[in-house]
Image (spheres, rainbow, N blue to C red):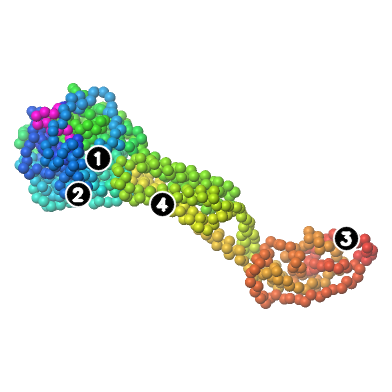
Amino acid sequence: MQWVLLSDGQIGGNVPSPRRDAALGFDSTFLILYGGRDQSGMPTQDIFTFNILQGYWDQLPFSNAPPARYGMAYTSSPGSGLYIFGGFGRQGSSANYNPYTAYGSGGLPGYKKSPAVKTKRSANVMPKQGYNTMNMGYGNSRYNDDNIDENYYPLADTWFLSYMTKSWQETQRSQYGRGFGSAAASPYSSSAPRVIYSMGKSRDWMYSTVETTGQITSGYNQYAGGQAATIMYDQSSYSPAYPHARYGHSTALLTDNHLLLYGGCLSGYGKGGPCPSTDTWLLHLDRGHWERLWECPTTKTGAAMVTLPSYSMCTSMARQGTVFGAGAGLNMGNEQPVAVLWGGREFNPSSIRSYLSPLNEVAVFNLNRKEWLLKRAGPSENGYPRQREGAAYVAGCFQGSPGMFVFGGRSVSDGQLLSDLWFLQASPQDALNAPQSRGCIYPFSYYHLHGIFQFFTYGLIFPAGYFVGRHTKTLSIRRPVHMGLQLFGVACAICGFAFGVHSVRAPSWLHFRHPHAIIGIITFILTIIQFFVGLIGAFFIGRHSVKSERLTESGHKVTGETFAYDKWGGEGLWRIGHRIIGSLVLALGLVNISLGVFLAVLPLAVWIIWYIWLGFLVLLLVGFEIVSFIRGSGANKGGSLKLQGREDPRGTSQSSLKYTDDPTTQRHRAVPAPRRGTSRVSLNDSSARDNSLNRRPVGSYSGDDMAPLITHQRQTRPGDVGSSAGLPNYHRPNERDYETTIRTRSGPSESAGFDYYVGYAPEHEQPLPYVEDLHIPRFAIA
């Protein structure tokens, strides 16, 4: 591959003024330059031709030329003509259009501008060694293309310049008026070619629409009107199955069935994504299927990309001479389809580091292997062309050699418009055999930082903080852990939001219009509100630790569980608001990460991993909420548990004696006669009392096996529900009340105020301590 300088761009005679976003066609021995915009941003209508054989420019007058415009999609077919689609122009401008402010120093419509200042030859030619310098001036309004585009009207008309009749004709219209799309035609077709027009933007929207005209679609006539057939309608940007809406991208038809798409800007105008992007797609027209290819070249917008002709095709064209038109046969030879990509803007505010291409680097795409290769091209005698964006380009032949013509554009180093003309001499085989430049480039941008911070914030930190604060009430360090996680998450959320805003190339009024941006703003605002609500609760609302008891019943056993939890003084409105806002932040954050995975144009494996993690996280949180709900319901039920009709598992007569529901209600129960020959123990010695519930009747005693209880001295026992004071007292028919019989002492061995436990089986008898009464003789005790 070799660069050749055809025109140095010095102004003089009929040389076109410096411009960008123009259209360039190739007709055997002529180049046709149409439209574009000058340094002030005003669209132009003039048409120039460059005589390839003699090397000079001429301005051509056309009575029916298309209206002035720039940013149109265009493509050229040597056997047919030059096709122009849409663009931005003056006709039909809206109320936003102001001719005085729009044209700047250019003046009013129809005013003939003064010739541009002549530039030195070295301004358009770079040395043979070195790299392109980087421009940091995108913040300057001078380079704010979006504000300039706002002054002009997006056009939907299409035009065709026939290389046979040398005349312009308006043809099939596009579905939507838009500019900065891209068009490609069947490579070197001898009849009406197939033309694909893709995507682009208007003043307030960006499209993913793909349209086609040509011999494969029915009813096409290059001289008749109508509407182009639609291959792909404008669709959402939340699918990995097809490329997202964009503008400033590059396309090339490698065959009649394969359309190659690269790069462009995906941000702004109602859509979202990286700008510039580095994704590559291959459209199979026969199936209407998009195939995502591996990335390699650095990010670019406004780059030049063509399908290279072969030597045999250029030889066939040379035999036809200057009278080359429709019906002439072209021989593509047996060379495989190869596309070359050069130029474009590689830096913008979203880039953390720009891997600027060396001056001699050209990207080469091989259709057979579906891969990109970064190759080196040789310099001309004057050096290399300056790196630029928005250049007019077309594939063609120069002195029997195939290659690509490049005219004008805007320098990416200083923003200066150029008017030089270059030719990259390269055939498909030359491009593949060129020496290697460097490996593939995978740039890292603020878009990536934005996604990483938001993933850790709303996909890891906030869910963990939510789980700790919601489902670990018995954890002693719950409060500091919850607050620490949420504070760290808020800091990460602020960083992620700042990176996202910084990475936006389009003005805010154009960017924050799609669901991901809108949900992101709402989520960030709620995050900040939740942060201040949490601070209010931490510093201004009192809190204290509360112990609570939960009663649970399992079979015939009632157990009690005591746990402690933090209780805030603002248990009412503050607690409800804190929980609602926290749940909204968590839910919106997860939804927005899912949308961002698609907008970031990440590989398929990345969003598969994310959705697996999202499913696990949702199941985990929902599962714990269900468990918490069930436990809460059980706790509420256990607090009002009433033991009704509890039966003795040993089959004794325990069911005949029930606890009273209200411990404050005093009932007198029968006190059985004491057993003879037992030792006596003082009632004040509670440690010697036997409170066992399971007792068997002894001897001929067939009454209740439960020891009589003195209500005002009864000890609390596990499973005793008498602590639920205030519960309703129900009449229980199986309860029997006995009259209390006052016994008199039968002898000096009995002391007043003693009660004796009876009804114990021998194996349950406990030896009572020996009590020596100093006032009672030993024989009396015996």
User: How many residues crowd around disc 3 within 10 Å: few (fewer than 14), some, or many (20 or more)?
Assistant: few
Residue marked by disc 1: 145
For marks 1 and 3 on the same chain, the one whose residue lies earlier in the sequence: 1
Identify which amino acid the numbered label 4 is placed on: Leu
Do the residues under discs 3 and 4 have CB atoms within 8 angstroms? no
Do the residues under discs 1 and 4 have CB atoms within 8 angstroms? no
Residue marked by disc 4: 588
| Disc number lying in front (1 or 3) | 1
Q: Quadrant of residue 706?
A: bottom right
CA–CA distance between discs 3 and 2?
A: 113 Å
For marks 2 and 1 on the same chain, the one whose residue lies earlier in the sequence: 2
Locate the N terminus and report the quarter of the image it occupies: top left
| Number of marks in the rendered image | 4
**Residue at (62% x, 56% y) in the render:** 547
Dominant SS type (magenta): loop
Identify which amino acid the numbered label 1 is placed on: Asp
| Disc number lying in front (1 or 4) | 1
Q: Secondary structure at mark 3?
A: loop
Residue marked by disc 3: 771
Which disc number belongs to residue 94?
2
Q: Nearer the viewer, residue 317 or 590?
A: 590
Q: Quadrant of residue 133?
A: top left
- Position of 719 with respect to 152 (left or right) is right
Do the residues under discs 4 and 2 have CB atoms within 8 angstroms? no
CA–CA distance between discs 3 and 4?
A: 77 Å
**Residue at (91% x, 65% y) in the render:** 781
Read off the magenta span. 10-23
| Disc number lying in front (2 or 1) | 2
CA–CA distance between discs 2 and 1?
A: 18 Å
Residue 567 locus on image (x, y percent): 57, 54
